[in-house]
Amino acid sequence: MAEGLRSEVASRLDDALDRLRGLRLGLDAEEVYRPEVPAALVAAGLHTICLPVDAGGLGAGLKETAIGQAALGAIDGSAALGFAMHQHVLGSAVESASWPAQLRQRLFAAVRDEGALLNSAATEEGGGSPARGAIPATTARIDRETVVLRGEKTWTTWLPALRFALVTATLEGDRAAPADDEPVIGTFLVDLQLPGVFRRPSFDALGVRASASGTLGLEDVRVGLDDMIARRWPGEPDPRGPAPGAWFGVCIAATYLGVGEGARDDVTRWALGRRPGDGSASVADLPTVQVRLGKLDAALRVARTVLLDVAGRWDAAPPGDRSALLADIGLAKITATNAAVTATDEALRIAGGPGYLAGRLERAFRDARAGLINPPLDDIAYQSYAKALIERTEAQAREGH
Ligand SMILES: Cc1cc2nc3c(=O)[nH]c(=O)nc-3n(C[C@H](O)[C@H](O)[C@H](O)COP(=O)(O)OP(=O)(O)OC[C@H]3O[C@@H](n4cnc5c(N)ncnc54)[C@H](O)[C@@H]3O)c2cc1C
């Protein structure tokens, strides 16, 4: 049983991992999205672990979720990334006080009773990363109690598997908008079974190729005004509080930590078994290889320690104190994604020619790069640490320290 998990969570995770192993992920030459992957995770009941106990789930917090995500990542980066999206949206919906109660109950019921899977569809072709303050070109035209959504979202991971997406859109005709016409961004829960929803495969990428991160088209999709989860002005903090950022950061960190850990385990097994030349020594016996193995293991263990520490502190903290943990969650994300890049790079150097051939190590090497692109990006995290450091030092100087 994985350390740090309650037995009910561990048994669902074990079941899910067995099912994924049965699909021989990472060994398939095709590297395309397979619907059996989300089906296996739903069949194991892993998709409800974050639901509160009174909603039929296991009440898993960030730490148990992170442990599970890393275990999935070690088997397959694309599968883990798709599931990370469901987990972060669901976990943050559980913890965000501003979600309308009825909407949240409807969502929970669909996850529990129908195996609904979720993601956030925020990125657009022209706007780039919403984490950089992009204003959606997707519009939400409010017409009394109905909202008409129109636009296109790119990079929507696991698009074929999704039942719901959290869609960001610029409000039009918003009765609550101020007179100065500053755009207001709404976030809507959209049932992807509605008329006007189109799913287009559009992902031809370096890594996580089986993640089906496609284009979601919304062609006059009608939702209710009561499907709006939150609204905000650009640059304003998310009214849902710190939970969406925390759940996203931890789920991404854990996914790529797992990709790195999978590569570590694969390359260690390979180095023990491979006896080149006269066969007297294995690759794992070579001192230079041991330096590389130790280096990649150290990077991953630092990342795991930082990640599980902050996830545990988040779970233990009262909701009002959690915002202060976001900086360390960003640290966990950049540490884990960079550790995965280091580990998969070292693994390929260890494996030489055999590692360069198409296979699990080569795939992990490509998959790990994707983690660098998800927010918070390294530069944003480093700038925020610098800002805090400068402010602290200036305050100390003012106080005469
Ligand atoms: C595998 C994968 C899956 C994804 N899945 C989803 C998903 O399910 N849903 C979703 O909504 N999104 C998803 N994304 C999108 C992702 O989160 C980014 O929003 C997307 O990659 C575009 O952001 P970008 O920073 O790469 O591009 P751009 O914003 O175009 O930026 C290009 C470059 O310029 C830099 N840059 C841009 N603006 C600034 C600035 N103001 N200051 C400094 N540097 C800047 C960026 O760091 C980057 O290096 C996914 C991305 C990946 C890689």
Image (cartoon, helix red, strand yellow):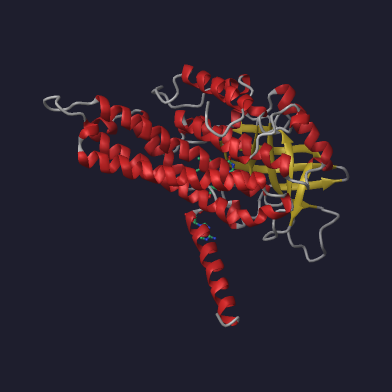
In the image, residue 168 above or below residue 181: above
Residue at the extreme top of the image, as rendered: 22
Q: Is residue 215 visible?
A: no
Question: In front here: 273 or 253?
Answer: 273
> Where is residue 370 shown, x and y percent of the image?
46, 42
Q: Is residue 33 left or right of residue 369?
A: right
Q: Is residue 280 left or right of residue 180?
A: left
Residue at 79% in and 40% down: 227
> Where is residue 52 shown, x and y percent of the image?
73, 33
Q: Quadrant of residue 144?
A: top right
Residue at 48% in and 16% down: 22
Q: Is residue 218 left or right of residue 261?
A: right
Residue at the extreme left of the image, as rendered: 278
> Where is residue 302 shown, x and y percent of the image?
44, 47
Q: Quadrant of residue 59?
A: top right
Q: Is residue 324 left or right of residue 102?
A: left
Residue at 74% in and 22% down: 113
Q: How many marks?
A: 0
Q: Quadrant of the C terminus?
A: bottom right
> Where is residue 184 shown, x and y percent of the image?
74, 56
Residue at 38% in and 23% down: 29
Q: Is residue 254 visible?
A: yes
